[in-house]
Amino acid sequence: MKRLLEIAPAGTSKTVVRVGDDDIEVGKVSAKRLTGLLMRYPELGDLMGGKKASPLRLIEIAADAGAALIAAGCGYHGEDTLVAEARAAELDIQDQINLVVAIATITYPPFGPMIDQLKSRVAIFLQELEKSEAPPAGETLPTE
């Protein structure tokens, strides 16, 4: 029988995600770090439990919560966390989504329904954003 210190910690299950031209290795987020994220973003806990969260609130927290999950899944903690979260927040939105999906799935496989809800909310948000940036019918954008 093995003892506690002989078994692998949570972060040893890894997967690779393509970000731009690079492959990034991500791993499971430990229960302690996941609990910290849930304390910062309680709506994530609601989503994990199958509850629906307010679309406006999800839009408010999505960037910060996603960046925090990415930093944790990439193994950053302690003093490096804020720098890693800031860097994750600057990634292309599709790269962020790919990283969040990979980290969430490897950390807690029942994240599936939460991921589906987040994907649909992001798609709706992006559609609305495109509509708001489009010129009204009959108008053209100024050229330089």
Image (cartoon, rainbow, N blue to C red):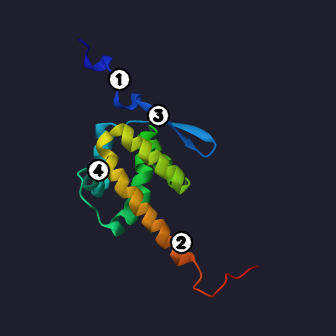
Residue 37 in sight:
no
Above or below, comparing residue 136 to residue 91 in the picture: below
Disc 3 versus disc 1: nearer the observer: 3
What type is the residue that disc 2 sits on? Glu
Residues at marks 2 and 3 touching, judged by CB atoms closer than 8 Å: no
Residue furthest front in the image = 138
Which residue carries the number 1 mark? 8
Mark closer to the chain start, 3 or 4: 3
Disc 2 versus disc 1: nearer the observer: 2
Q: Residues within 10 Å of mark 2 (few under 14, many from 20)?
A: few
Which residue carries the number 2 mark? 130
Residues at marks 2 and 1 touching, judged by CB atoms closer than 8 Å: no
The quadrant the C terminus occupies is: bottom right
Residue lying at 49% horizontally and 46% vertically, measured from the top left: 84
**Badge number at residue 15:** 3
Residue lying at 47% horizontally and 43% vertically, measured from the top left: 80
